[in-house]
Image (spheres, helix red, strand yellow):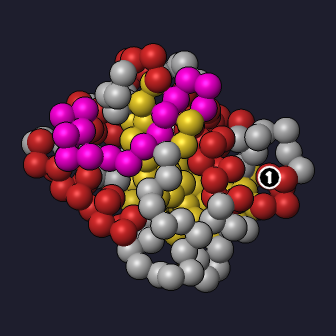
């Protein structure tokens, strides 16, 4: 843990409808519910989870990486639906020296189409630029993942290029689209 870190405990982020909080071991069943769903994880690297142990390990890994200030990944909850985790969003890595991070997210299928990810990502981006003093936030997604491409574009991310046949999954190669959002673009945008 760095003494220079701009955060000394895991931050809770809130929006009008959402509460983003640290994952707990008791969230494993909720995480397994969406990480084990092929429709949710189809464009993620790796197969859908097959066991609850995988969800437990993910939670442990996310929390250990936060303790080392290498990533910030929040469990997404809907305020008027209780404390059940319906998705994950946050910084998959954080490079303090270069003042950059990469975002990612996934959401339980029964919550798709409700604007939850853009709402969660707005508060996460704001946290990144204001609290973590980031200059650059990166994202990538499979070219065929048009829903994720729309979310990133809606948030003001710009396409930087495509890594052709970047990874092999399900018996084929997939192209990966690269995005970024810079501090100066964010501070001048209407996307906040």
Measured as percent of width and height from the top left, residue 73 is found at: 43, 53
At mark 1, the secondary structure is helix
Tell me, yes or no, if residue 105 can be seen here: no
Q: Nearer the viewer, residue 25 or 161?
A: 25
Q: Quadrant of residue 30?
A: top left
* 22 horizontally vs 188: left or right: left
Image quarter of the C terminus = top right
- Using a 10 Å C-alpha cutoff, classify the residue at mark 1 as few (fewer than 14 neighbours), some (14 to 19) or many (20 or more): some
Measured as percent of width and height from the top left, residue 176 is found at: 52, 55
Residue under label 1, please give it. 186
Q: Which residues are magenta?
A: 15-30
Q: Nearer the viewer, residue 85 or 1?
A: 1
Q: Residue at x 68, y 50 (%)?
A: 126
Q: Is residue 61 magenta?
A: no
* 183 horizontally vs 62: left or right: right
Q: Residue at x 44, y 56 (%)?
A: 10
């Amino acid at each position: 843990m760095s003494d220079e870190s701009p955060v000394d405990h895991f931050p809770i982020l809130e929006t009008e409808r959402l509460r983003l909080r640290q994952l707990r071991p008791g969230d494993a069943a909720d995480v397994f519910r969406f990480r084990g769903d092929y429709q949710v994880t189809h464009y993620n690297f790796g197969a859908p989870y097959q066991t609850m142990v995988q969800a437990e390990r993910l939670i442990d890994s996310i929390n250990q990486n936060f303790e080392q200030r290498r990533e910030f990944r929040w469990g997404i909850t809907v305020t008027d639906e209780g404390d059940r985790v319906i998705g994950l969003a946050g910084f998959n890595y954080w490079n303090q020296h270069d003042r950059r991070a990469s975002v990612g997210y996934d959401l339980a299928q029964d919550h798709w189409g409700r604007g939850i990810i853009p709402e969660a990502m707005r508060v996460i981006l704001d946290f990144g630029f204001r609290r973590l003093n980031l200059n650059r936030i990166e994202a990538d997604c499979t070219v065929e993942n048009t829903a994720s491409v729309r979310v990133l574009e809606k948030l003001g991310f710009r396409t930087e290029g495509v890594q052709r046949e970047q990874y092999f999954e399900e018996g084929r190669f997939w192209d990966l689209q690269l995005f970024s959002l810079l501090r100066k673009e964010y501070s001048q945008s209407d996307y906040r």
